[in-house]
Structures are given as C-alpha cells and as structure tokens.
C-alpha cells in the first residue's frame, strides 16, 4: 500500500462468483466516478415520522457537505490528473472524470475487465485507498467498478403466446382501478401530485402509455423522463416492460398526477445518482417515490459503502417528507440466491422505506382476504414467483419494530429489520395486471406492480391531507398506536386488511408465514385505503408540531 493513502472503510470488493478475468482495463480510457463526502454534522437517526419536514435548503445547509471539503477534494485529486465535473453540497457529491491510470493511482487500485453471465463489467478486488489528506472527508467512491445491480423484479414473459393485441386482451387482465376498488382507495385522480419512479434500464414510450390509458379509460398523465447520468430514456433492452408497468399502474389510478421517471445505469453509482436526483429535484418535488429494483443483501453486488450511502439518502428523503415505496422481491425468502440462506432485498430492507410485498387476490369483487403470493416453487428461474420477505442481516431492528418478535431463519443472524411492511396484489396468473408494452398487451405482476400500486395510494392520500401535508415517512407510523383506537391498535392493523394465509418458503433454511397481525410475508397486510387515510389523518392531528 502507498503510505500516503488510507484504507476506505466499507469499500471491500470481491469478484462476482463465476467471473473470469479478461485482462487489465485500458489505462487510457476515461471514466467518471462519484465521491460521497462527510456531512457538516451528523444527520440524527429518525425514531419516528418527523412532525415537520425539512426543506431541501435546510437539509443542505445543516447536513450537507462543506464547500471547503469539496474544494479540497478537487484540489488534491486534480494533482492526480482527475478533474471535477460537478459537485453538490446538498447531495454531498463530487463527480470527477479522468483516465483509468489516474484513478488507479489516486485510489491505489487496479481495475480489470471481467466476463460474467450477468454481463461483462469493469471491476476490482480488495479495498480502495484515498489520499491521506482526504481520509476523513471521503466516505465512498463509486464508478470504478461498474458491475450491474441485477434486475430483481419483473418476471420474464412465461408464454410468448400470452402476448395479445390490445383488442383481444382478456377481461381477466385487470386495470389498476379494479385493484384500487378492491382495496378501497380514497377518491381522487392525483391532481396536484407528483410521483417519482426510479428505473435502471428500458425506456418510456408514450405510444404504449396512450394505448394503455385508452384501454383503462383514463386520461393520459404528464410524464417526464429524466436521464440522471446519460443513460437512455428510451431503450428497448428487455426492461421496457418494467418501466411501462410502473408508469401504467400509477397512471391508471392517478391520471392527473405528474409522473417523473428518473433513469440511470444498473450500477451502484447509478442507484446513488438516481436517488440523489429524485431527492434533490426542487422543480418537480415528488411527494412519493417508487423503486421496483434491487438485489439481495449479503452478495457481491452491493459494497458496504454503497448500502450505507444509499441508506443515508433514503433517510434524507424521510426528513424531507417523501415516502419511498420499494418492492420486496419476487423470489421468496431466498431472494433468488441458491446458497441455502434467506435474504432480504436491498434497498427494500432500509428502515427508511416502505417495503412492499406481494399477495394473490382470491376474489377481486368479493370480500375474501388476499393470500400470500406464491406461484409454483416460488422462484422466477423456474417460471414461478413469490413475495420477498425476510429479516435483514445488515440493518438492526428499529425501535419502532421492537414489538415484533420474528427472528431470522438463518442461524446466528442478528435481530434485524423485518420486511415487508405492507403488501398488495402481485400474482401474475390468478390476478394479473394488464401491461401494454411494445404495442402489445400482456399479463404482468410481481412486487414491482405492488410497489407502484402503493405509491399511487400514497399520492391519493397526499391529495386528501389538509394544508398541503404529505404522508411522508409512513413506515414507523404503521407500528405505532392509532389515535383513538381501542386496545392500542396500530396504524398498520387499523389501515390494512390482515393476510393470514400462505408463506414464502424458497430458502433451504426456511421462510416466513402469514399469520394474525404483522408477519414477514405480508407485513400488516393489504391496504384498506379509506381506513388507512382516516387513521393517518387522526394520528397526524393528534401529533403536536415541533
């Protein structure tokens, strides 16, 4: 190690299992990296929903990076031949560009090209090191390694014969309003609300949305596509169905809302940049954000520094009064890994998000309660699927989940954050969503449909709250006693329909079963939108402003 450098905690990287080294990266190639810097002062932990949200300016001035630190990073790294492209006090970022040779020297690392079944990538192994002058300033360096964050949500089309023309799509493929009716969503069309959606592939195609809205009988919402890092916003790479599903679920329930879709690369740097862009977006100011992407904890996809910095940004969103809904995964307790253990999916396992699991609707127009979503053996690789749900191996159990006694099925595991918090329909076969993509209609589902469904509900509730209030950081509120409830019933129990049947057992160590009250397969259950709105309104009105 160069004695003028210091190890960057959390930066350890290993090669992806099965990856093959192709050779050294081109030393003359120019790449961009994003550095996350320390805060002026620590952002306090959130034990509950903040009574008063911070503004973006307040957050930046109190808890952002200092300009002196940004200037020092620029000065020191320019000596290595790395130039600053942009910087942000509020996001605590410095975006820098330079040849790989300069990056290797600055961070005391060697970069290699790897071949892997999930896609070739430029990567590294071991720790990063930063110049000694920056050892307390720089908290993360992202972009040197550009392995993909594996897309975890949308199931492949199981039968290409299922794709049909719009005129012939079966009536058993349901539009979002039917799910909204089933879950008793409050009235409204999303007018005055802005919904954000994060995407890491695919594209937005107005023609498909227009055809969907015609089929669903709603007006076409305003959709703005934003590339946060130069990634295409109209790629047909096989992920466009994921994008259009997210947009169409929201559009069907909130046709008068503004929808902003933030696109980025499928990398750690991409996830960090997209989240920063949504959180910093003063112009559009989304009140709720949906994320249908992620990857299991405990893998070589995420580095500790990335999980830490993403979690910090999600905490910032909670302070701003932004609700972040994240799909819990579509491969049951294993989250698609075959190592035998159960895995929570990240960023769904962050304590600052609303983790959304999946159910099957037994009777769309009747009173029967949903059951936990489990198709086939629960694994998408086998043409099945099932709800994510687990106990985190990374994030300790928050105080607001202290009454939850569920333990991890993994031996020797920590008492971690339990997910999901809530659930909604995700079944591809029994109660599928209508999706229009590439000019065709097809059935779809997964927790990547349940997450935007909950996102639409949050937007509708925001439209009903007095004085421009937002639901905001809902998650801890679900676990607290509802105002005026008999027997100290929680907000989650009062505002959701309990799911008591089914499990998500796909890991050899086991999984999690539904039962009375909160469980790690369906959370508090499926939404009863009007009841949830009423109990939120009552609880907020009884909470004094600070």
Image (cartoon, rainbow, N blue to C red):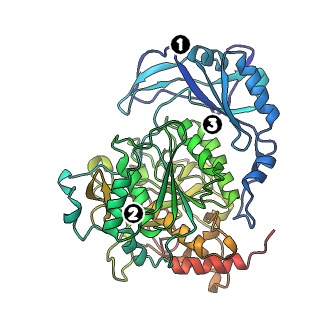
- In percent of width and height, residue 360 lies at 35, 68
- The answer to which image quadrant residue 357 occupies is bottom left
Q: Pointers 2 and 3 in contact (CB under 8 A)?
A: no
**Residue 237 visible in the current orientation:** yes
In the picture of the structure, the residue carrying the numbered disc 3 is 305
**Residue 331 visible in the current orientation:** no
The quadrant of the rendering that contains the N terminus is top right
Please tell me whether residue 393 is drawn above or below residue 148 in the rendered image. Answer: below
Comes first in the chain, label 3 or label 1: 1
Q: Nearer the viewer, residue 526 or 519?
A: 526
Q: CA distance from mark 3 to mark 1?
A: 27 Å
Q: Badge 3 local density, few (<14 within 10 Å), some, or many (20+)? A: many
User: Quick one: SS at disc 3?
Assistant: helix
In the picture of the structure, the residue carrying the numbered disc 2 is 503
Q: Nearer the viewer, residue 391 or 234?
A: 234
Residue occupying image coordinates x 75% and y 65%: 52
Residue occupying image coordinates x 30% and y 67%: 215
- In percent of width and height, residue 272 lies at 58, 41
User: Quick one: SS at disc 1?
Assistant: loop
Q: Pointers 3 and 1 in contact (CB under 8 A)?
A: no
In the picture of the structure, the residue carrying the numbered disc 1 is 28
Please tell me whether residue 100 is drawn above or below residue 481 in the rendered image. Answer: above
Q: Badge 1 local density, few (<14 within 10 Å), some, or many (20+)? A: few
Comes first in the chain, label 1 or label 2: 1
């Amino acid at each position: 190690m160069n004695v003028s450098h210091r190890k960057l905690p959390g930066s350890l990287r290993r090669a992806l299992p099965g990856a093959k080294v192709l050779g050294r990266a081109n030393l003359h190639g120019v790449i961009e990296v994003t550095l996350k810097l320390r805060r002026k002062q620590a952002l306090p932990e959130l034990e509950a929903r903040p009574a008063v949200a911070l503004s973006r300016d307040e957050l930046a001035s109190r808890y952002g990076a200092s300009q002196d630190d940004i200037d020092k990073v620029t000065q020191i790294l320019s000596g290595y031949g790395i130039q600053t492209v942009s910087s942000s006090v509020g996001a605590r970022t410095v975006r820098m560009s330079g040849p790989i040779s300069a990056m290797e020297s600055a961070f005391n690392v060697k970069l290699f090209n790897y071949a892997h079944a999930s896609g070739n990538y430029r990567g590294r192994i071991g720790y990063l090191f930063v110049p000694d002058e920056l050892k307390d300033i720089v908290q993360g360096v992202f972009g040197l390694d550009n392995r993909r964050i594996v897309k975890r949500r949308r199931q492949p089309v199981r039968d290409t014969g299922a794709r049909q023309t719009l005129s012939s799509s079966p009536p058993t493929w349901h539009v979002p309003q039917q799910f909204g009716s089933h879950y008793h969503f409050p009235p409204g069309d999303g007018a005055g609300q802005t919904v954000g959606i994060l995407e890491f592939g695919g594209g937005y195609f107005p023609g498909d949305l227009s055809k969907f809205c015609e089929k669903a009988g709603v007006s076409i919402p305003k959709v703005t596509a934003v590339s946060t890092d130069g990634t295409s916003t109209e790629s047909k790479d096989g992920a466009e169905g994921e994008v259009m599903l997210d947009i169409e679920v929201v559009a069907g329930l909130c046709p008068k809302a503004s929808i902003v879709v933030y696109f980025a690369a499928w990398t750690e740097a991409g996830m960090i940049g997209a989240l920063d862009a949504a959180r910093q977006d003063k112009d559009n100011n989304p009140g709720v954000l949906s994320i249908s992407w992620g990857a299991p904890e405990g893998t070589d996809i995420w580095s500790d520094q990335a999980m830490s910095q993403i979690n910090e940004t999600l905490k910032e969103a909670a302070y701003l009064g932004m609700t972040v809904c994240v799909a819990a995964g579509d491969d049951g307790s294993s989250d698609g890994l075959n190592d035998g253990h159960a895995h929570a999916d990240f960023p769904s396992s962050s304590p600052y998000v609303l983790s959304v699991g999946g159910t099957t609707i037994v009777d769309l127009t009747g009173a029967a309660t949903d059951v936990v979503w489990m198709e086939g053996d629960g694994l998408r690789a086998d043409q099945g699927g099932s709800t994510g749900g687990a106990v985190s191996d990374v994030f300790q159990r928050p105080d607001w989940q202290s009454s939850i006694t569920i333990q991890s099925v993994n031996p020797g595991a920590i008492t971690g954050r339990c997910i999901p918090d809530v659930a909604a329909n995700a079944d591809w076969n029994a109660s599928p969503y209508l999706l229009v993509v590439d000019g065709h209609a097809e059935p779809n589902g997964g927790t990547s449909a349940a997450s935007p469904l909950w996102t639409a509900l949050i937007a509708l509730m925001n439209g009903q709250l007095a004085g421009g209030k937002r639901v905001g950081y809902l998650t801890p509120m679900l676990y607290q006693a509802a105002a005026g409830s008999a027997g100290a019933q929680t907000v989650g129990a009062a505002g959701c329909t309990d799911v008591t049947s089914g499990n998500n057992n796909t890991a050899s160590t086991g999984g999690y079963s539904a039962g009375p009250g909160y469980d790690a397969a369906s959370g508090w259950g499926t939404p009863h939108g009007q009841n949830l709105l009423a109990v939120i309104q009552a609880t907020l009105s009884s909470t004094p402003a600070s």
